[in-house]
Amino acid sequence: MKSLLALFLSSCALSAGAADVPAWRHAHEAALLRDFTQLLSFPNIAANKADMRRNADFISEMLRARGITPRLLETPDAPPVVYAEWIVPHAKRTILLYAHYDGQPVNPAAWTDPPFAPVLRRGPKGPVVAPDSADAVLPDNRLYARGAGDDKGGVMAILSALQAIRELKLTPSDSLKIVFEGEEEAGSPHLEAILRSHRDLLKSDLWVVCDGPIHPSGRNLIVYGVRGDMNVDLTVFGPIRGLHSGHYGNWTPNPGLELARLLASMKDETGHVVVKGWYDDILPMGAREKAAMDATLAFDDDTRRALGFAKTEMTLGLAESATVGSLNINGMASGDVGAMAANVIPDHAAAVLDIRLVAGETPARQFAKLQEHLRSQGFLVLDRAPTAAERESSPKIAMITLRPGAYGAARTPMDHPLAAALSRAARAASPNGLVELPTDGGSLPLSVVVDALGAPAIILPIANGDDNQHAADENLRLGNLWAGIDLLAATLLHDQ
Amino acid sequence: MKSLLALFLSSCALSAGAADVPAWRHAHEAALLRDFTQLLSFPNIAANKADMRRNADFISEMLRARGITPRLLETPDAPPVVYAEWIVPHAKRTILLYAHYDGQPVNPAAWTDPPFAPVLRRGPKGPVVAPDSADAVLPDNRLYARGAGDDKGGVMAILSALQAIRELKLTPSDSLKIVFEGEEEAGSPHLEAILRSHRDLLKSDLWVVCDGPIHPSGRNLIVYGVRGDMNVDLTVFGPIRGLHSGHYGNWTPNPGLELARLLASMKDETGHVVVKGWYDDILPMGAREKAAMDATLAFDDDTRRALGFAKTEMTLGLAESATVGSLNINGMASGDVGAMAANVIPDHAAAVLDIRLVAGETPARQFAKLQEHLRSQGFLVLDRAPTAAERESSPKIAMITLRPGAYGAARTPMDHPLAAALSRAARAASPNGLVELPTDGGSLPLSVVVDALGAPAIILPIANGDDNQHAADENLRLGNLWAGIDLLAATLLHDQ
């Protein structure tokens, strides 16, 4: 049995094995950069199946070169999932490492360099660096290509961490399974089916998702959950056709004003949604979660100032505001503005709402609360356009529909034993510090994983915050890849 | 001196001279139709100066053919104003008859028949009628061409009424002046200058504007005023760039919601503008005006039902609601709706307001009230985008600007002696009845006429309500032209 001192040390220092990783990594940076550059040279838009197979084949080759046998999980109409495993004898637990090798569609005209001819530059949009020069591997260099940050960088970090562990003759603390998906940016349309049809193969105790950027402050980041997401279309009806605002102004109700009133009725001045029961289903946060969020408050003022506004909507900090379901007006429109504006009472006004869900909430229940709110504001609530009879009898008419693809939140408690062990190791391997968030404000369909496999998930990103993910000139800062390899290897060696 | 009975009869029966007009008109319908068809064959988009001169020349020719000497009032860059006069010896008063010969721009692809090759059809979009057939002049036939209803029909009715009076050897009750403008649909950019530079020539006691459609009930219509008009652009600012609604939702204020709240704050549930002092400047209506408006209440329910809504905005009737300044949301926009909607907190939200002014109100004062309202709602009110320092110090920021071209209302009291005389004659010449409105809900820059010339104005339209003015397949129902000739001649013979 370990002494208390040893236990303490294990919670704040790198394990002996993990401590060797940076030196190994440093010695192999040039070779890793060559592999990464080649990986980025394969176009990776999920819809182009032949391209995706070339990616999967190259990733398989990289796995084999690292002594790991790959397997392609095939599904009709989907790019293959590249699967691999490293079963550790007598390991009690299994971690599943996830990244995706597809990228967002590209508009090459918007790019400085071609998106699939990776170019190395000194700093953001700096001068080109020769890939075979001694300076090529410097940490502030950036490799520009689609997928560099999101998420072939994640694939490369996982492959490299496994290679480091293997070549240093170390053993992961847990058995490892690896899933590299090929259509995340297309909305993962086949993921649930793939997971369900390989339920036993993919059985694990925890998913570690290597995707997204680290904390804006430059610190490493572990995120224990994501919000769910649903979109709602809302239309308020006015007269049956657009009317002259002079001839009919004051007499014919304006649907833009009705929509404005309706939207204004949904929140109070402190940003709280006043739709009845809106927050009733939220599962409370624990003490560890609260402490982790409080630790991020110091970053908020800088973020707010950089975004150019004086006062936050709710009085909560940024991290804590993500633990509350949100209701955002993505867009609203009635008639035209600017040069196209006409003197008209429009025939309708429309809005699209984005509702983020936290653990405990479901799309169906939030949608029902919203429908009920519309009724409480005097609206006839429909899921289609009104009939003539409904127009004649109902002063206020709204159509509201829930878009397909809504899903709930997923959250792993921060005191989950395996997650906590990884967190301790990650903190020790984070020279700039580690930020932990109980949940991200954004969404991923992790609830699909949880529902299909029963495994909780955490997110351990490596990319720089300014990696231009989803945009032109996507890039990965090499220092983030190097630190990410160290970080991942350390977490996989958490008990050593 | 006339007996009381004679006075009574004069207020409800056609004068002897006017009674002869319908028979004369009926005998000349075929010839009038030929002239009108030829007039409509000249393209009349104000921007095409050579086209407009051909129109002016043809109208001049028609005046000469009717024994009236035309004169072209020339202004650089403007189509000529066709001017004429019929000075009646010893007449104490002068009426100025106004119509415009230009039309709205056309998209020929949207038209059933070419817009400048007039086609006669039996009823709305009915079968083509040969222009030389015996049935050509039937009242339910419609002549299709740009300008048929708006407003070459007005030009033709004036020319024909004058011809009828002259050929029946009658004398108008007042001296007459005629102004046919050539750029009304382009916003009359030179009208004020033309009026001011011909102030003495155009001196008159009353303008009679022959433009627009008759009452939707099919009754003739006299309108004694128009509302003024102003447009306001309003922008509410959010974060300095669009933000991910997941990562920042609940924390970053949404400008769409701020705009919704601001717009909702401007009116109460009964449609009254609650901007402080909004209605303070309105000049009250007299008893005749109130009685005239009450007489129109019976039409309101049918109109409301046809427009497909259950409850009017204010509880006033349609006619009376035009006697109150209005505030309409022409358009509002933030982010996108429909298929283009993204999960974003937009960086701004915009609205365009249409504010109609009634007699007593000025654009400058209404704009100042609106600015003050924004301040009362906690906004920093700017006429430009905010600086970084303003963003940092002001939780709510709005930019509001008044568009150029705003103008006030114009209204002639219904007991104006000459207007009242015309009204009596018009009522007698209206077999279906006459509706009188103290003011139209819509706007014309008549205040420009009033300000430039000091003459009040009334509007005496002749077109069918379904003439598709400003749209494709514009048309005039021939029966409206025939009745319009009778109506105009009768009003010009009001004391006979």
Image (tube, coloured by chain):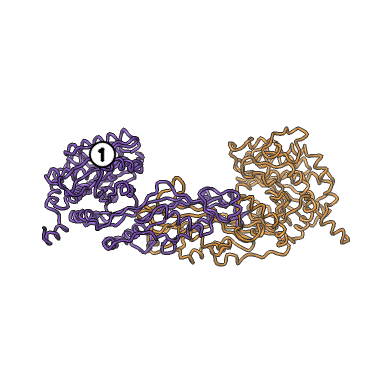
Chain colours: A purple, B orange
Give the quadrant of residue B482.
Answer: top right
- In the shown orientation, is residue A358 left or right of residue A175? right
Q: Quadrant of the N terminus of chain B?
A: bottom right
Residue shown at 72% from the left, 39% from the top: B141
Q: Residue at x 45, y 61 (%)?
A: A276
Q: Is residue B308 left or right of residue A361?
A: right
Comparing B377 with A194, the one in front is A194
- Image quarter for residue A98? top left
How dense is the environment of label 1, judged by Cα within 10 Å: few (below 14), some, or many (20 and up)? Answer: many
**Under tag 1, what secondary structure?**
strand
- Which of B13/A180 is in front? A180
Q: Position of residue B358 (x, y in %)?
A: 63, 60
Report the number of discs: 1
Vertical order, A111 against A310 (above or below):
above
Give the vertical position of B427 relative to A134 (above or below).
below
| Residue where numbered disc 1 is placed | A82
Q: Chain of mark 1?
A: A
Q: Which residue is more in the foreground, B5 or B229?
A: B5
Residue type, numbered disc 1: Val
Asked if one can make out residue A197 in the rendered structure from this viewpoint, the answer is yes
Q: Position of residue B223 (x, y in %)?
A: 70, 55
Q: Position of residue A495 (x, y in %)?
A: 15, 53
In the rendered image of this protein, does residue B250 appear above or below residue A484?
below
Where is residue B452? Give x, y as percent: 66, 57
Q: Is residue A337 visible?
A: no
Left/right placement of residue B455 relative to residue B234 reads: right
